[in-house]
Image (tube, rainbow, N blue to C red):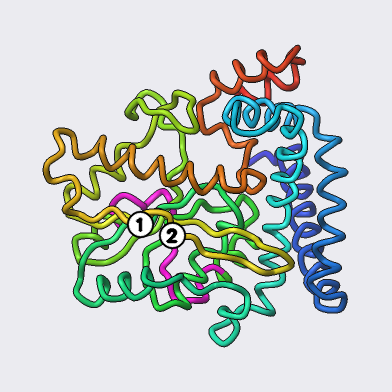
Amino acid sequence: MPVNHGDSGAKWWVRAVLWLNDLHRRMLGVWFSILGPRVAYAVTGLLARLLYRLLTPLRQLSEAQCAAALAGLIPASAVTRVAERAFVHRVWDLTDLVLADRLLHAGTYERYGGLVPEPHLARMLALQRRGQPVILLSSYYGPFDLLPVFLGFNGIRAAAVYRRHANAAFDAYRRRIRARGGCELVEVERGADRLAAALQAGGSIALVADHYADRRGMEATFLGLPTRVMRSVGLFAWRYEADVVVAGIRRLGTFQFEIIVEDVIDHTDWRDEEDSVAYITNRYLRGLERIIVRDPTQYLWAHTRWGHEAALRALRASGPVPGAAAGNAGK
């Protein structure tokens, strides 16, 4: 069989880049352990700001979507600061993971702000004991990677959906940390069947309900802008009579967090509604909006929540659209 040297070379370089990424992550862990969380956040925050200013297409997309979604809620002059700060928070997610590997365990999670506030914790644990299905919803807000860890340490056992990272070694590292509290991590490819089984058995599931649903979804608004939303959350809740908890996690400072429970939709709340799925969907969207508006610097504004066409419209409204930015938004 002939050997394709080009493919072999490409694979060698891919393996080399992945190895360097893993080495970089391990070195970060060593340096962060030596320097401490405060220095770790300061250094990665500075690097994030520099990188943000270099990544012109990403910066333009973030600022355009931020300006469109928060029009009338924040001054136009604040958009640049909010969008840049949101990118810094996203880079800090990696810092959180590296620090969590050493700092976060069952004996320390309360120290770092990982306790689910009352009366919500007591209620969720009671629902779990009696086998009442629960759907926990969040968005691309704050250090969402850590939410399954904290849920598990609070005694909440949930099947949490996640998307695999392209770097298998990093994915295994992140998965190990996120599963530390005892939550089951479910790859998105097998999510529907596993989540249905968990709810059928009276368990809890957790997912980021912040994806554009293309033509298959229902029409809705998010932060005042039209979008399309997955119907699956509402259908799951309706079919299995599940309570729906709208929550998030906010970064307060140097490896300090706050868990927010914004709304709890009881499975009896939609009994008299003409369209139960629409009621559930619109209510959880309003809850996620309230979390974001309270501190918009922690939302991932580069995420095309409203679809690629809406992202292009936002870019055009914000000024001339260079070919690079338009191409990036359309992928």
Residue under numbered circle 2: 261
Magenta span of residues: 178-194
Q: Secondary structure at mark 2?
A: strand
Question: Which residue is pictured at 21% across the width and 66% down the height?
Answer: 132
Q: Position of residue 279 (x, y in %)?
A: 25, 38
Asked if marks 1 and 2 touch (Cβ < 8 Å), the reply is yes
Looking at the image, the residue that sits furthest to the bottom is 107
In the rendered image, the quadrant that contains the N terminus is top right
Q: Is residue 189 magenta?
A: yes
Depth order, front residue of 176/78: 78
In the rendered image, the quadrant that contains the C terminus is top right
Q: Residues within 10 Å of mark 1 (few under 14, many from 20)?
A: many
Q: Is residue 48 magenta?
A: no
Q: Nearer the viewer, mark 1 or mark 2?
A: 2
Question: Which residue is pictured at 66% across the width and 14% down the height?
Answer: 317
The image shows residue 143, relative to residue 208, as above or below, that is: below
Query: Taking 193 as reference, is 31 left or right?
Result: right
The image shows residue 91, relative to residue 114, as above or below, that is: above
User: In terms of image quadrants, where is residue 75?
Assistant: top right
Question: Which residue is pictured at 46% across the width and 45% down the height?
Answer: 288
Amino acid type indicated by mark 1 = Val
Query: Taking 204 as reference, is 254 left or right?
Result: right
Query: Taking 293 as reference, is 281 left or right?
Result: left
The image's mark for residue 278 is none
